[in-house]
Image: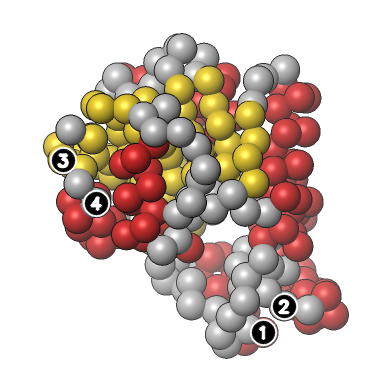
Amino acid sequence: MTVDFGRTADDYARHRAGFPPEFFARLERLGLLRAGMTALDLGAGTGTIALGLAARGAAVTALDPAAAMLAQAAARAKEAGLALRTIEAKAESTGLPDAAFDLAVAGQCWHWFDRPRAAAEVLRVLKPGGTLMIAHFDWLRLAGGVVAATEDLILAHNPAWAGAGKSAPYPAWYLDLRAGGFHAIESFGFEVDVPYTHEAWRGRIRASAGIAASLPREKVAAFDAAHAALLARAFPADPLAVPHRCWAVWGTKA
């Protein structure tokens, strides 16, 4: 399945819930985020993590291979009055200088990378004592819930989609950090319900890898109509309370 999130940048920016404030608060309490530090957001997309870091005083570089996504990130930064440097590049070959960053974060994207190459590249661009954090904010598939029904509908329209039933924690990411030369591995996790209107949840799902990022336009429209009917019939409450888990694992460069 070929995935291009640039095709769904508008829905991604408008409807995809970003990492919750508690995520950034925990980074601050752990001493991983502080004003004046240099931070790199890998696979930044529309800038969800980058903007959260910048709002708390970090000097942030947002890196992504999709120009359309970076354009959304830059527009959101301008609207919020935040400074944000954007670079169109891949995590495996950033083109950035050695030992330039205190913190690198890969939010909801580590699985898209050539992971050993990305880890080696991040190790290169981090300062000694710098941190690589792999973070997720995943919806949770619960029996009888809106996530399960939505995932089943995605599979009916796109059987090649491999994202059903996946949520953190991801044990392989611990091993990636170890193999990549990082030590003092730690993690945290918590759950939260995210309110989504029917319109926003439809937009959130259109922005997923299984729909607008991989299907032709006419199939996206067919899915969206079926999704709207499903929500109206089986989940009439508006807004919905969509369960999510926020989870992060990180390691330190010696």
Query: In the image, 146: left or right of 203?
Result: left
Q: Is residue 60 visible?
A: yes
Q: 36 or 207: which is nearer to us?
A: 36
Would you call the spot at circle 1 few (<14 residues within 10 Å), some (14-19), or many (20 or more)?
A: some
Q: Position of residue 221 (x, y in %)?
A: 83, 74
Asked whether the beta carbons under mark 1 and mark 3 sit within 8 Å of each other, the answer is: no
Q: Quadrant of the N terminus?
A: bottom right
Q: Residue at x 69, y 43 (%)?
A: 70
Marked residue nearer the N-terminal end (1 or 4): 1
Label 2 and label 1: CA atoms lie apart by: 9 Å
Q: Which mark, by number, is residue 157? A: 1
Who is closer to the viewer here, 94 or 79?
94
Rendered residue at 53%/65% (across/down)? 147
Q: Position of residue 163 (x, y in %)?
A: 48, 72
Tag 1: amino acid: His
Rounded to the nearest angstrom, the CA distance separating label 4 from label 3 is: 9 Å
User: Counting residues from the N terminus, which is met first, the one under dot 4 or under dot 2?
Assistant: 4
CA distance for labels 1 and 3: 42 Å
Find residue 240 and report its horizontal and vertical position in percent.
62, 52
Q: Which residue is mark 3?
A: 183
Q: Secondary structure at mark 4?
A: loop
- CB contact under 8 Å: marks 4 and 2: no
Tell which circle, 2 or 1, labels the residue nearer the N-terminal end.
1
Q: Residues within 10 Å of mark 2 (few under 14, many from 20)?
A: many
User: Badge 4 is on which residue?
Assistant: 180
Q: Which mark is on residue 252?
A: none
Residue density around tag 4, few if under 14, some if 14–19, many if 20 or more, within 10 Å? many
* Left or right, residue 142 beside residue 50: left
Q: Position of residue 179 (x, y in %)?
A: 19, 55
Q: Secondary structure at mark 1?
A: helix
User: Which mark is drawn over residue 215?
Assistant: 2
